[in-house]
Image (cartoon, grey):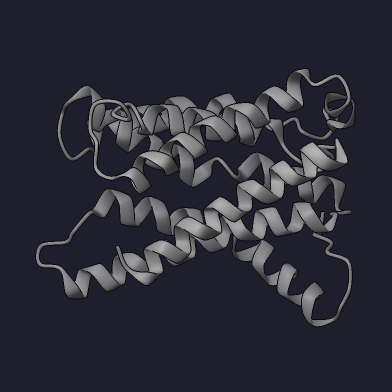
Amino acid sequence: MNIFRLAGDMTHLFSVLVLLLKIHTIKSCAGISLKTQELYALVFASRYLDIFTNYISLYNTSMKLIFLGSSFSIVWYIRYHKIVRRTYDKEHDTFRHYILILPCLLLALVFHEKLTFREVMWAFSLYLEAVAILPQLVLLQRTRNIDNLTGQYVFLLGAYRALYILNWIYRYFTEPHFIHWITWISGLVQTLLYADFFYYYFQSWKNNQKLHLPA
């Protein structure tokens, strides 16, 4: 554990809390892509297959439970909550997210650290997480009008992965034989997908204006 890893984890946790705050208190999921949330639920379900068989620490297990539970609860809220589901923008959230799953699975079958079911699913979760934000970014571009909580949620998601890159750089120079190409490349791709959003987010913050993305 180092300061960059901890900051990344806390930023990721805050992003989930911001989204749950929006859904639970405002009873609205406007601007939130169900497609992205379903992909994240699949990411965590495939990544944490060892949650009850491989104990590392209380911190590690707690974070796994939080991300698993929150991802599935968010999907439930958007799909089935009698008030929240009415605010879901199904008309604009039309990205065919299922087309991302098979290529990521094929990549995992070819590029993995070890040919075991758990390791292949771990690689699959990394590849899928790298592109899971795409439906959300497309939805924001289509609606253009982005509320503060949605903007903060997406920003925190991008910041979490950027902080993890700093964590990997730190560990590369401080730990012997720390080389994980699959994690590094998928993390870099994920961060680059946020570049356009980051630019407009900081522009809106600098000019004290409402966040808008170009169509």
Question: Of all residues shown, which one is farthest toward the bottom?
Answer: 206
Report the side of 1 relative to 30 (left or right): left
Report the side of 4 relative to 56 (left or right): right
Question: Of all residues shown, which one is farthest toward the front?
Answer: 58
Q: Position of residue 4 (x, y in %)?
A: 39, 69
Q: Position of residue 97 (x, y in %)?
A: 60, 29
Report the side of 122 relative to 174 (left or right): right
Nearest the camera: 130 or 57? 57
- For residue 193, which quarter of the picture? bottom right
- For residue 168, which quarter of the picture? bottom left
Q: Position of residue 134 (x, y in %)?
A: 62, 44
Nearest the camera: 109 or 155? 155
Asked if residue 13 is positioned above or below residue 109 in the image, the reply reads below
Q: What residue lies at 22% left-to-right and 54% top-to-bottom?
A: 180
Q: What residue lies at 70% left-to-right and 41% top-to-bottom?
A: 20
Whether residue 153 is visible here, answered yes or no, is yes
- For residue 139, which quarter of the picture? top right
From the image, which quarter does the C terminus lie in?
bottom right
Q: Position of residue 43 (x, y in %)?
A: 46, 33
Q: What residue lies at 57% left-to-right and 59% top-to-bottom?
A: 158
Report the side of 4 relative to 71 (left or right): left
Question: Of all residues shown, which one is farthest toward the left?
Answer: 176
Q: What residue lies at 89% left-to-right and 73% top-to-bottom?
A: 209
Whether residue 96 is visible here, answered yes or no, is no
Asked if residue 11 is positioned above or below residue 110 in the image, the reply reads below
Nearest the camera: 187 or 18? 18
